[in-house]
Amino acid sequence: MNKHKRYIKMVIGFLSLLFVSFIIWINQATPTSHPIIPSTLGQESNYQSLVDSLSTGKKISVNKVKSANWKVPLSGLLNLEADAAKHAGLEDHDEDIQIFTFHLKHPLHGNFLIDTGVSHQFYNDPQSLGIPSWLASGYGLEKLTILTATDDYIKEKNLDLKGVFLTHLHLDHISGMSAIDKHVPLYVGEGETQESYFLYAVTRNATDIMLEGRPELQEWPAEYIDVFGDGSMFAIHSPGHTAGSTAYLVNTVEGPVLFIGDASHTAWGWNHGVEPGSFSTDQARSRGSLDKLIKLVKSNPEIRVQPGHQSL
């Protein structure tokens, strides 16, 4: 009997150790194992230089590409516990959103994208990109409808891409990666690849597969980066949704535009100052970044705003 009890205790102890190890592993998961280096593009700048650029910076042509329609839970897109959301009586439901890529054409440096849209491979065969059927279902990919695949846009415009500026590494922002030539440089925000979060244990393999064979991710090293050194575009570190979330201020031929990524997914969130909900890794930090971007636009009302997944 004593021998039997000792055996049971050993099994329970072993299973407990496995469980604890599993929990530790999950909570230490990072977005990707892909290598990263300091960016070779851009120079450290500051808020005042960004504001001055609104009247002096070189102009970039921008084309907005609606790559796909999608439906996702509003509770992920918006903090429904925020006072403004409660006052408006918002309740969780499937919200209509879009997945975008933005084509930038700099007069000297050529063609770039902000985020990647959706590729045919991601839409038609997500399993080939490390997204098994259970993850595709959990991610709601059956609710995604492609509009303009990134492959088709690149081919139509005969683009020789010089780089992709990523707002962050969530799958819906790199879902067009397989359409992009593997030599094209990729740029991410400071700390994006080092953050630990339990859900990255689920998505890390797919992210690694999409980045496989590509050059090291190039990391912006400061809060404000003058991307081309001519005031035409600034990267703005806006952490909270992810640790390296980045907004981009672009002085376009039609005036300055702030691409805020998922600092606010929705038009309502931006207009009412409500940060994202459960899709963010640090909601309090996300609120701080959203407030910073709102303050920038209020102080400089000529700036138009492009949320991450809707339009104003």
Image (cartoon, rainbow, N blue to C red):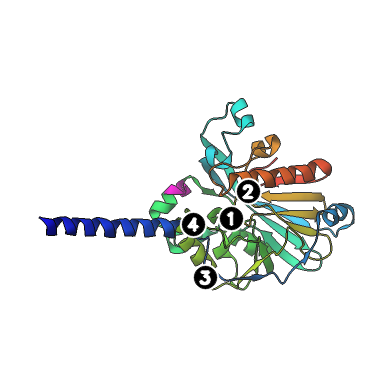
Q: Secondary structure at mark 3?
A: loop
Residue at mark 3: 212
Of discs 4 and 2, which sits in the foreground?
A: 4
Chain-order first, disc 1 or disc 3: 1
| Kind of residue at disc 4 | Tyr
Q: Main secondary structure of the magenta part?
A: helix
Relative to the observer, which residue lies in front, 8 or 122?
Answer: 8
Vertically, is 106 above or below 134? below
Q: CA distance from mark 1 to mark 3?
A: 16 Å
Chain-order first, disc 1 or disc 2: 1
Q: Secondary structure at mark 4?
A: helix
Q: Residue at x 62, y 26 (%)?
A: 87
Residue 157 visible here: yes
Of the 4 image quadrants, the one containing the C terminus is: top right
| Kind of residue at disc 1 | His
Q: Start and end of the magenta stretch?
A: 138-142
Of discs 1 and 2, which sits in the foreground?
A: 2
Q: Are marks 1 and 4 in contact (CB under 8 Å)?
A: no
Q: Residues within 10 Å of mark 3 (few under 14, many from 20)?
A: few
Residue at mark 1: 173
Disc number at residue 200? Answer: 4
Chain-order first, disc 4 or disc 3: 4
How far from the left and from the top, in percent, is residue 99?
59, 50
Disc number at residue 262? Answer: 2
Q: In this image, 88 relative to 205: left or right?
A: right
Q: CA distance from mark 4 to mark 2?
A: 17 Å
